[in-house]
Image (spheres, rainbow, N blue to C red):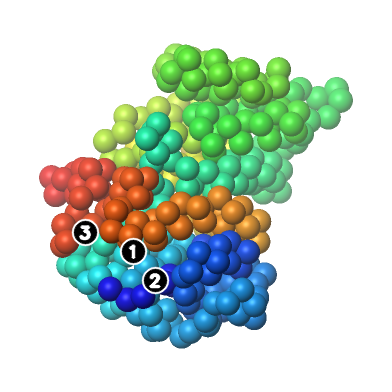
Amino acid sequence: MLGKSVSILKETRNGEKRVILLPKEACEFTEAGYQVFVETGAGQLSGYPDDAYRDIGAEIVSTKDAWHSSDVVLKYKAPGPDEYRFFRPGMHLACFMHAEGNLDMTEAMRASGMAAYALEFFQTQDGAFPVPVSDNEISGKLAIQLAAYHLQSHMGGSGVLLSGAPGAPKPKVVVIGYGNAGGAAARLAAAMGADVTVFGTRWEGLRQFQASVPGNVNCRINTPEALRAEVLTADVVVGAILISTHDTPPMLTEELVKEMKPGSVIVDVTCGYGSGYMPSFDKLTTYEAPFYERHGVLHCKIDAMPASVPRTAAHATSYNVWRNLLAFAQGIYGGEEDPVARAGCVVRNHQCVHPEVLRHITLENR
C-alpha cells in the first residue's frame, strides 16, 4: 500500500463543476498527517483555484498522477468510461456512485480488483444515510425553484404564480416523501405561500415531520385514494421517495397524470431506475432541456440537480462529508474498516458485495 495519502479528483461528467472537498476541509487531512494530492483544476469551477489547495499543503498533480499517487481516491460523481483505465488492485475509491444504475461500471470495478464505496450508501448504526444529506436538501429546494419558474405560461405551464398573490387562489403543492429532499421541498413551497400536502408511509414519522413545519403543510398517509384526491388539484407534484427501481410499484400512475390539471408540473427528485413509482417518466432531462410535456403535464427528472449550483453544493457537501471521508481513510490505513463506510462498499476482491446492487444485477439478468 502507498503512504498515508488521499487523492481528490476533478469531475469529467458534462456539466459537473463540483469537487468533493474544498481546501478548508482538505486541510483536515493534511493536519491529520495525510499527504493530499489534488488533480489540477479540480476546484476551479467551485471557486477554488489550484493555489488555494497549495496553501493548505496539497500537491497539485496531473490526471494520471491523481489516480495513481494514492490508494484512497475521492471523487464527487461516478467515474466515466474513459476513467475505467485507471482502475487497479489496491485502489479504494469513494464517490456518489449510483452503481445500481450503471452495471457496466460496476463490472469494470469488479474486474479490476479495486475496492469501491458508494457515498450514498454510507450508513450509521441507527439506519441514517449521513453523506448525501446536503445534496438531497439542495435538490428539494431546486425542485421547487424549477417548478415555480416553469409554471409560467411562456414556459408551457398553467400560468400560476407559486408564491401566490392577494385575491388569487392559493397554489397547491404535493410532495411524496418527507426525507431530506422532500422536507426541503415542502418547507420552501410553504415559505413561498403555497398550500402543501406531504405524503409518507409511516404515521409516526409523519407526525414528527408535521411538528417541524408551518401550518400550511398538511401530512397524510400515502394511499392511492388520498394521493389521487390531492394530485388532481395540484399545481406542482414533487416525487422524493428514498429509492425507485424497476420493481417499485407505481404511485403516480399514467392514468392519474392524464387527469391532472393542464400545465401542472411534476419534478422527480428521486431519479430512480425503470418505470418505478412515476411511470409517466420515460427519460431523464437536463438543465439544457429540463422539462418535457406528456399528457399536458410538464415533467422534470434531472439526475444531478445540485450541479447547477456548484459553489453552494460544493461548500455544503465538503462541510458535511469530510468527517466521514477522514474516518474512511483512517479505516483503510489503520486496518480496521470504518463501519459506516463498510455499509457503502459496492465491490471488493473481484466481487460485488452490496445487496442493493446485487438485487439490480438479478433484475437486469431476468
Q: Is residue 19 visible?
A: no
Q: Residue 123 in the image: x percent, y percent?
A: 38, 41
Nearer to us in this view, 145 or 330:
330
Answer few, some or many: residues within 10 Å of disc 3's Cα (few below 14, many 20 plus, some between 14 and 19): many
Residue at mark 1 to residue at mark 3: CA–CA distance: 16 Å
Q: Which residue type does callout 3 highlight?
A: Arg
Q: Which residue is mark 3?
A: 348
Mark number displayed over residue 103: none
Q: Residue at x 48, y 47 (%)?
A: 132
User: For the point 62% across and 31% down, which residue is it?
Assistant: 186
Which of pointers 1 and 2 lies earlier in the amino acid sequence? 2
Mark 2: amino acid: Lys
Q: Which residue is mark 1?
A: 333
Give the residue at x 40% y 39%: 124
Q: Residues within 10 Å of mark 1 (few under 14, many from 20)?
A: some
Which element carries disc 3, helix, strand or loop?
Answer: strand
Dot 1 and dot 2 residues touching (CB under 8 Å): yes
